[in-house]
Image: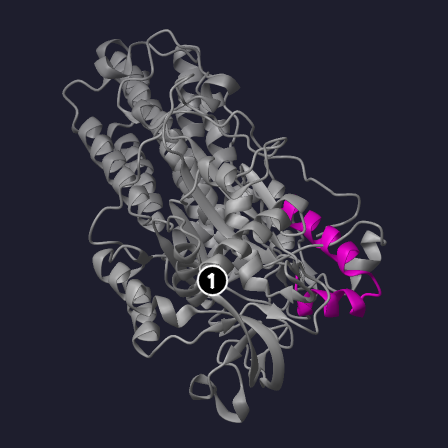
Amino acid sequence: MAVARMNMNCSIQSSLSCILKPSYFFNFKTTQFKNRLYFPQNHLISSKRSLLCTCSGNFQAGEKAEPFVITTPLYYVNAPPHMGSAYSTIAADAIARFQRLLGKRVILITGTDEHGEKIATAASACGSSPREHCDVISQAYKMLWKDLDIAYDKFIRTTDPKHEAIVEEFYFRVLAKDDIYRADYEGLYCVNCEEYKDEKELLKNNCCPTHLKPCVPRKEDNYFFALSKYQKPLEEILEQNPDFVQPSYRLNEVQGWIKNGLRDFSISRAAVEWGIPVPNDNKQTIYVWFDALLGYISALLEDKEQISLQSAVSSGWPASLHLIGKDILRFHAVYWPAMLMSAGLSLPKMVFGHGFLTKDGMKMGKSLGNTIEPNELVHKFGADAVRYFFLREVEFGSDGDYSEERFVNIVNAHLANTIGNLLNRTLGLLKKNCQSTLVVDSTIAAEGKDFKDTVEELVEKARINYENLSLSSACEAVLEIGNAGNLYMDKHQPWSLFKQGGAASEAAAKDLVVILEAMRIIAIALSPVAPSLCRQIYAQLGYSEDQFDNINWSEAKWGGLKGGQVMAQPKPVFARIEQIKENENGAEAAPQKVVKKNEKKQKVQGVIEA
C-alpha cells in the first residue's frame, strides 16, 4: 500500500526540488472475468462531497442504500506521485463514475500514507521535518488528481488526528482478542517494503524481489500480530469466495502464500519516531501497515462526526472494491483480512491487484532516465488523452507498456479522428443544410435502419465490460460505436443527398440525426473514461452543464434527441496531437504545438510544474 504526507512550513519549492522526479514505476490493466461482478445498488448521494468531485449524484433524495465504496492505495509520501499511482487512481475514478451512472451512492477514497522510516529519511535528505515533507507531497497528489479530473469523495491522510484515534481504538480491540503480544525478533528487513523477509523468498545477496535491494539484518523488541492464528479462516474465506481476490491468477498467488504457512508479523518499531505511538507503550510506534490500512475506514468519518470505529463503519464499511498494485497484494489480501477478523469487522468484498508499467518495452528506472512523469504527461497532452490511453491500451490487471509514439497514434486515431471528427463534420453538415436544427426525433430517424440495433448492442457490451472491470474492452465497445457511425456516414453520403434535394435531402437530414444520436450515446458511455471530452460533446449537442452532470446510464438508450433541438455551432472537441520531429542534425524541425488541453492548466503555487 502506498503512503504519503508532508508539511507546508518548509519551502515547497526546496522540498520538492530534491524529490520531484520519482524513480518508481508501476502498473496496469485487466483480464476479463468469466463471471460478472455484481455490486449492491445504491441510490443516495453523500451529503458531503469533495470539492474536487465534479460528478453527478443521480440519486433519489431521502432514499437509503448501501454505498459502493471503492479505494485506491493510500500513496506513500517518500516521493512525489509517479505514473503507477496515477494509473491506479484513474482506473478507480473511471469505475466510480460508471457506478454513479448506475445511480449508486459511490464513495471514492484516496489519500496518503505518511508514517514510517522512509518518510523520516526522505524528509531529512531535503532538510525538512517529516510533517513538512508530508504536507508538500500530499498536496502534490491532490493537485495531480485535480489535473487528471479525479472526482474523489474522501482524501485521507494518516497523520490526520481522526485517523490516529481510529488506529488506537482498533489496536485495543485486537489486543483484547489476545492477538497482540510482545517478543524479540531477528531477521532480514526490507526498508522499502517495511517488512521482515523470509530468506527463501529473497534473491541473490539477500535482495528483495520487489525492490532489488539487499535486506538488512535487524533485531528488535516489537509487538506482533498473531497472523498464524488466522491461517485456517483465511483459507476458508478464499475457498468460499473465489472472487475475493481478482484477477483469478492473483488469487492463486495469495493461496500459495497461505498454503506455505503464515508467520506472525511485527506491528511496531522501537527505533522509528515518526509514527503513531503504541497506545500502551509510548517507546514504540505502530508499524506502517497496521496503521495505513486503517485509512480505508477512518476516511469514512464525516467532519464533526463522533470519532469512533462504529461511526466510521456505519458510514460505509465494508469497501466494495480495493484497487491496488500487485506489489502490495499480500498486505491487502492476507494481513488486512486477518486484522479485520481479529477486530470483529467485515472484510472488503474484493481486492483487485493490477500490474506494473513499462516504457518502450523496458522496466523503468531513474538511472535509466526512462520514467514517466504524470505531471508532464497530463500538462503536455491533457487529462482525457492520458486517461483514455492507459485505460484503453493496458489490459486491466496485467502489466502494460507506454511509448509516446503509440500514445500519440492511439489518441489521434480514436479521440481526434473516430469520435471528434465524426461529430464535427456531422454538425457542419447540419449547420449548412438544416440551420443546426434536428428535423425529427432520433427514434423516427432510425426507423428501418440496422444502425440503431448495432449501437444498442455495443452499449450493452460496454456496460457488461464496465461491470466486469474490463475497462479496455469497455473503451473498445464505445469506440466501435464511433467506427460504425463513420461507416454509416461514408455509406449514406448525406452531403451528396443534400445536393439532390427533395426526398433525398429529407433522408440526408434524418441520417444526420442518426449519427448525432450515436454521438450522444458515446458521450454517456465514454464519460467514465474521458469526462471532459464527453462534457464537450454533450454541450455541442445542445445540452446544458446541469444536464450532463445529471445523466445516468439508462439515458444511453436510443431516442434521446428530439426534433427541433438546436445543436451548438461546430467546434472541434479534441485537437490532434502534433509531434515535434528532429531533422538530420538533431535539431527540432518545424516545431508545433503538441496539444491543446481542453481545460485550463492548474498550478499549485509552484508546487508542481511540467
Camera-side residue: 524 or 424?
Answer: 524
According to the picture, the residue beneath numbered tag 1 turns out to be: 27
Measuring from the top left, give residue 570's x and y in whole percent: 50, 23
The answer to whether residue 132 is magenta is yes
Camera-side residue: 316 or 609?
Answer: 316
Q: Residue drawn at (42%, 76%), measured in percent from left and top?
A: 263
Residue at the far top: name it.
564
Using residue 222 as the reference point, say whether residue 140 is left or right of it. right
Number of disc labels: 1
Measuring from the top left, give residue 14's x and y in whole percent: 84, 59
What colour scheme governs how the chains and residues are painted in the rendered image of this protein?
one colour
Measuring from the top left, give residue 77's x and y in whole percent: 66, 59
Q: Main secondary structure of the magenta part?
A: helix
Q: Residue drawn at (35%, 50%), measured in percent from left and top?
A: 472
Q: Quadrant of residue 53?
A: top right
The answer to whether residue 80 is magenta is no
Q: Residue drawn at (33%, 11%), measured in percent from left and top?
A: 562
Would you place residue 554 above or below residue 74 in this image?
Answer: above
**Can residue 83 be seen?**
no
Q: Quadrant of residue 521?
A: top left
Mark 1 Cα within 10 Å, few/some/many (few <14, many 20+)?
Answer: many
Q: Which residues are magenta?
A: 115-144
Would you place residue 249 above or below residue 166 in this image?
Answer: below
Q: Residue drawn at (25%, 62%), measured in percent from left and top?
A: 236
**Can residue 407 be seen?**
yes
Residue at the far bottom: name it.
205
Using residue 166 as the reference point, say whether residue 440 is left or right of it. left
Task: Look at label 1 and name its amino acid.
Answer: Asn
Would you place residue 272 above or below residue 77 in this image?
Answer: below
Measuring from the top left, give residue 331's x and y in whole percent: 46, 64
